[in-house]
Amino acid sequence: MAKIELLAKFTQIALPNSHPLLKKVLNYAKKHFSQCHMLSSSLLILNDTECFKKNYLLNWVYHALECAHEKDISQYSLEEILQKSHLPIRIKIIAQNTLLEKIEVKVLTFGAEYALFITKHPIAKRFLRQKFSGYVFLETQDELHIRGDSERFWELIVTLNENKIVHNACLYFIYPNGFGKDSYTTLAERKLRECYKALGFIKHENFSEVKKRYLELAKTYHPDLCDLKENKALYAKRFAIIQEAYRHIKKHA
């Protein structure tokens, strides 16, 4: 799948090795940029002062992919892409037989202003940091906390109802909130469901898995282990929720 992506240190044009545009793009880059470096599966353009030429290249590729009716060319507009033309450009060549890595990301929502993503994968975390820039208020090894009260915040959440292709990886979003309408019939069952959700489970797990997850989270969020003073209150709040959920499951599951 052909795509244009804005990454932290460069703009990436990803093209399958069989794409009809690839040869033209590589030839243009080698002809017009002096600082081109061919790697095993990509070409780097490092000319920092050649923004005009890079604008032309990005503009040309974007419209060529549009004319070829490529889907999901970029999550960014052409204007946003051109604003980053001062960055190096990486032309990534994707082998046809490259298999997509499936990355699972759990999405938990708490009320109307707070959501939590659970994933340890660096590609998924980088994608989420970029997508929710300005909303992230806490990040740990496998959790990303975001908060916002604007309409735009929930528009971004809703866009995660479909899988996302990022760097030959497929981000698969699942929602532990959705246990199904008939999964509980009493307040007690609903409370139990919320406790499983607080620990990041999509379904009722056996207690050994619950305990393992609890110990991981308790070690991560114990306030005494927080290095940043300004985050201690956030850690303490999350730690209290984890403890309460674990104790309730231990007693009632």
Image: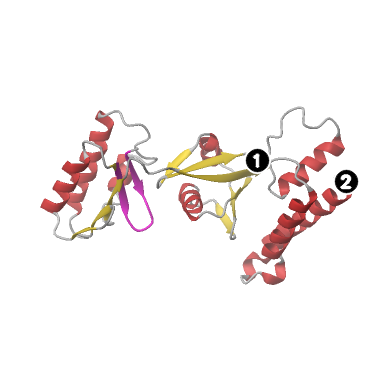
Circle 1 SS class: loop
Which residue is at the front of the view, 215 or 206? 206
Please tell me which residue is depicted at 71% across the width and 34% down the height of the picture: 179
Tell me how the rendering is colored: secondary structure
On the image, the x and y values in percent for residue 23 come to: 18, 43
Instruction: Look at label 1 and name its amino acid.
Output: Ala
Can residue 175 be seen here? The reply is yes
Q: Quadrant of the N terminus?
A: top left
Circle 2 SS class: helix
**Which residue in the structure is indicated by mark 1?**
112
Q: Is residue 118 magenta?
A: no
For the residues marked 2 and 1, what is the alpha-carbon distance in whole angstroms? 28 Å
Q: Is residue 81 left or right of residue 181?
A: left
**Which residue in the structure is indicated by mark 2?**
252
Q: Earlier in the sequence, mark 2 or mark 1?
A: 1
- Residue found at the very far right of the displayed protein: 251
Q: Is residue 4 magenta?
A: yes
Give the number of the disc on residue 103: none
Magenta part of the protein: which range?
Answer: 2-15
